[in-house]
Image: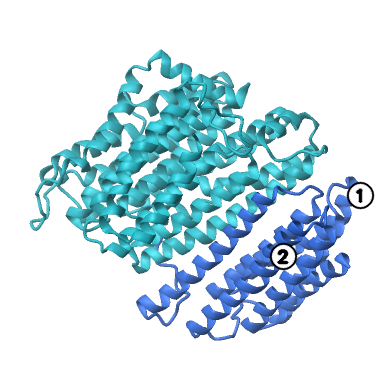
Chain colours: A blue, B cyan
Amino acid sequence: MSAIAAVLIGVSLLYISTTARLESYIKMLMLQGILLFMVAAGNAHDISFTSIIIIGVETILFKSIMIPLFLLKTIRKNQIKSDVESYFSGFTSLFIVTAILTLGFLTAYLSASSNAVLEPLYFGISISAMLTGFFIIATRKKLITHIMGYMILENGIFLLSLSAAKEMPFIVNLGVSMDIFIGVFLAGIFINRIKTNFDQHDIDDISRLKD
Amino acid sequence: MYELLIYFPLLLALMSIVLRNKGFSVYVLPVWSIVQTVIIFFLVFSKFNFLYHGTEKYFAVDNLSGLFLIITGFLFIGSSFHSIDALKERNKRDSSFYTFNLLVFVFAVNALLMSKHLGLMWVFIEATTLSGAMLIYFEKKHSSIEAAWKYIFICSIGVAFAFIGIIFLSAASTHSVDLFFYEMNHNAPLMNKTWLKFGYTFALIGFGTKMGLAPVHSWLPDAHSEAVWPVSAMLSGALLNGAFLAIMKLTRITELAGIRSFSSTLLLVMGVLSVLTAAVFVQKTKNYKRLLAYSSIENMGILSLCLYAGGGALFAALIHALGHSLTKASLFLTTGNIYRRYHSKEIFNVSGLISTDRMSAIIWIVSFFCIIASPPGLLFVSEILLFKELVQKESYGLIILLFVLLAAVVYGAAFGLLKICVGEAPLNIDKTRFPLRNYIPQIIFVSAVIILGIYMPVSFKSFIDSALEVITK
């Protein structure tokens, strides 16, 4: 069950790479949150009520409901066109993300043969997700897609922490989720501000400060 | 008692946002900053039994974190007195917003310095990013929003790297080990070397982003130049040290695990790159606050090199961190006095500071000589100690390279920073004197740096030595 969910996260990365609409990105982020819940719940060391609640807050509430809805609101409010605007075509992106997935599995395969501290399947997919996050940040033009890339990166890190056998104390986990959530929230506010305060046509112009 | 340093700033922050009273927002900062510093002194130096520390699960004050807490405490006093003037013409909404974020920032820095758990330290380092971003955004100009965006985005990705590193570190420990520093130190020899190397590399890149080490420094000049001056001082003096503390503790783990040569190489590369970046950009920049920011990058590079050299240079690292924080805070706080007279951050729009504001000019020039590590400042002592250690290691190539790069930094900084003091002042400059609170913090900081540079009391030395024991014994 958990394994299927993890593989589906990998598939969602492929879909993200090809789609050209911001709404699809948001749907995929929602989906990834739910899938992460399934992976985490399937792996929890003790299925106690509190641990399920904490995992649920981290994944379902933050990653799958609040952040995507907030991003959607930011898009509507700033009338951001739903076109993703990439430097690469859909096909090239798909090709590159496929290569990233291959690389992820290769790394997982190699690491599994050397020692078995990390669960290979999750490890491979988490590496792919992190690299895809970077790829999205580097090759998409809009600021809002940078936030989405950051979320994909964070989802990858979440999966990575699941692949390591040891768990963090829940206070740390909760702190991490809070930080990420507030971070995305503030980044969204800055996007709003650029639009409302300066009536900018191009809210993605952030290259004035330099030497 | 350490709980006061965590809960009280938060409580006061909430009060300032709930009350929305301008008087409260403005004056709570200096009052709390002084109380906080007194508490810190009690925590670090008192031998009373009822002040237990080191027994709590997640937080503790040892002498190393104590040193950084003291630095933070003093800087916070300075910047909160300057905040009174920074908030003078703001409405109550802005003031409470500012106070809220500054107190949350101080809370996060305090908590990160006292964290015994690596994961928790990460949480608070990211919390400084968030509150810091709001403080940089405070002026609400296009440039400050841009700087805040870059700061939050680059630092968040940076510390995401650090988190990957933390996960690898937990994968490296073969036994069931939590990420408490003492447990990791204890189990370091048993750790899996490959994963530890991966973990350290990622964590160094991540915390290095926060510390301002090249090549991941790009947020720093923007953030430092766009923030209001008391905030710039806090960012440069308190925040960068916090990230340095994390890196020191992680380097200690690699040392115990027997891969110190690996971590040293990385520190060497990042240190030299930082000094090099500063040496190049100091020549180019035309904004005096950005120039100070590049000087911070240079000094962070030197800290990283001290950590690379190890041995006696670790003592140098701690006094360099102290000296840099105080001197840089003095410079950044003085930029406030300059900016309010000239309304410009461009070097070419500011001239004749000696005739318009003699006191600021004197502070500025003296601090300048301290920051370029000329005698008799504390930074001179620390850099001599670093070079001494490098001579002992017989790395003469590095010494020559450092001399050249530091000379270039001094040349560029002197050209920019001293130029604004001399020459004809523009005619329309207001020459009325500011209240004394705009000068006294800097005077105290710089005098401390000079006095410690000339004569270092035995008790101070032994305190630094005891702080070093945390990462050497």
Determine the residue positioned at 28% across, 48% down.
Answer: B27
Number of residues whose C-alpha sits closer than 10 Å to that of mark 2, classed few (under 14), some (14–19) or many (20 or more):
many
- Badge 1 sits on which subunit? A
Question: Which residue was labeled with disc 1?
Answer: A113
Q: Earlier in the sequence, mark 2 or mark 1?
A: 2
Query: How far from the left and from the top, in percent, is residue B420?
Result: 21, 47
**x, y percentage for residue B456?**
37, 17
Residue that badge 2 annotates: A56
**Residue projecting furthest to the top:** B458
Closest to the observer, B34 or A14: B34
For this rendering, which residue is in front, A175 or B67? A175
Task: Left or right? Give the position of B458 relative to A167.
Answer: left
Q: Can the viewer see residue B313?
A: no
Foreground residue among B44 and B337: B44
Q: Residue furthest right?
A: A113
Please give the name of the residue rendered at 42% of the width and 61% of the height, measured from the top-left corner. Answer: B147
Q: How many marks?
A: 2
- Kindly identify the amino acid type of the residue bearing the numbered disc 1: Ser
Q: Chain of mark 2?
A: A
Looking at the image, residue B147 sits to the left or right of residue A127; the answer is: left
- Which amino acid, mark 2? Gly
Provide residue B308's location: percent of width, then percent of height.
Answer: 58, 31
| Residue B362 place in picture, x, y as percent | 19, 36
**At x 33% / y 67%, what residue is drawn?**
B141
**CA gap, disc 2 and disc 1:** 33 Å
Disc 1 crowd, CA 10 A, few/some/many (<14, 14-19, 20+): few
Q: Secondary structure at mark 1?
A: helix
